[in-house]
Amino acid sequence: MTPPADAAAFLDSAGWGGAAILPLAGDASFRRYFRVERGGEQAVLMHAPPPHEDPRPFLAVGGWLAERGFAAPRVHAADPERGLVLLEDFGDARMREVADAEPGREEALYAAAVDVLVALRGHPAGPFAPYDRPVLHREAELLTEWYCPAVRLEVDAEGYRAAWDAVFDDSQAGEPVTVLRDFHAENLMLVGDGLGLLDFQDALAGHPAYDLVSLLKDARRDVAPALEAAMLGRYVAATGAGEDFMRAYHVLGAQRNAKIVGIFTRLWRRDGKTRYPALCPRVWGYLERDLAEPVLEPVRRWFGANIPADKRGDPSVVGA
């Protein structure tokens, strides 16, 4: 977490010369974050280094959100060519840690997050690429590409694609909305009386159920079935969503969690990030709950025929 060599010059050009640069966080990508302090002021320096990263999508999506009243961090300065962006600092009160430390606030915090998605649904989708069937297939296939070899399984890849193709119609109906794609408790900050948004650079135009799945089937934090049901009820009451929405919720829940199992395995096998395999059992739990839904029958049959129960879990353990 050493600051990039050109950080001091960038900060000087942005009017933050001489500021202290302190390590803040990294994530599953190549992006890194630093807290910048000068006197009583604070900001966040994002380093999204080319060619691995490009901060332009983050800037574009953040601008779109801010124009519509959503709490994306303000941009103080940006040099996309060098992958440097100076952002508003939302502080340290992240929804994940607050909900863990204060269980009595958990339901209210999740309700506030659901309300953000209700508000987001009230706007036509932004000028973003479609979250269409080819993208859904490509993501779901991360499981057969990375997880299955890691646990020493040879599977029917063609049948896997066909099984998903049989259910994806339910995730493509209706008017698309802006889908932030990583909307969960570790990417939501308590800012004033609302929630600040982070990690939205991969936004697409897709089904509104996807971000609700991200929130309520959180790969990094247990969400109790009773809380999930209550928040689904809140969303449905506010939007009038019906049975078609719930079918999409289950399809996209299964798709997202199949993808995450593949991504977490890739982060371990390819990138050496050893914390991710241990998160997979939780994700498998969410996936199996959705596979039990009637709309997922073709996909459930494929899993039953190709991935035995004892091969569903932490790939570093079940593949040993």
Image: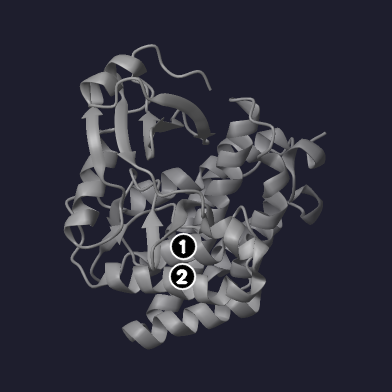
> Residue 249 shows which numbered tag?
2
Q: Residue furthest top?
A: 5
Q: Quadrant of the C terminus?
A: top right
Residue at 63% in and 76% down: 104
Above or below 96: residue 275: above
Q: Nearer the viewer, residue 184 or 290?
A: 184
| Mark 2 residue element | helix
Q: Are marks 2 and 1 in contact (CB under 8 Å)?
A: yes
- Going by the numbered disc 1, the residue's amino acid type is Leu
- Alpha-carbon span between mark 2 and mark 1: 5 Å
Residue 117 vertical position relative to residue 179 in the rendered view, above or below: below
In the rendered image, residue 24, in percent from the top left (x then y), is placed at 51, 34
Judge by depth and name the residue closer to the eye, 293 or 27. Answer: 27
Secondary structure of the residue carrying numbered label 1 = helix
| Residue 67 appears left or right of 26 | left
| Left or right: where 263 falls relative to 112 | right
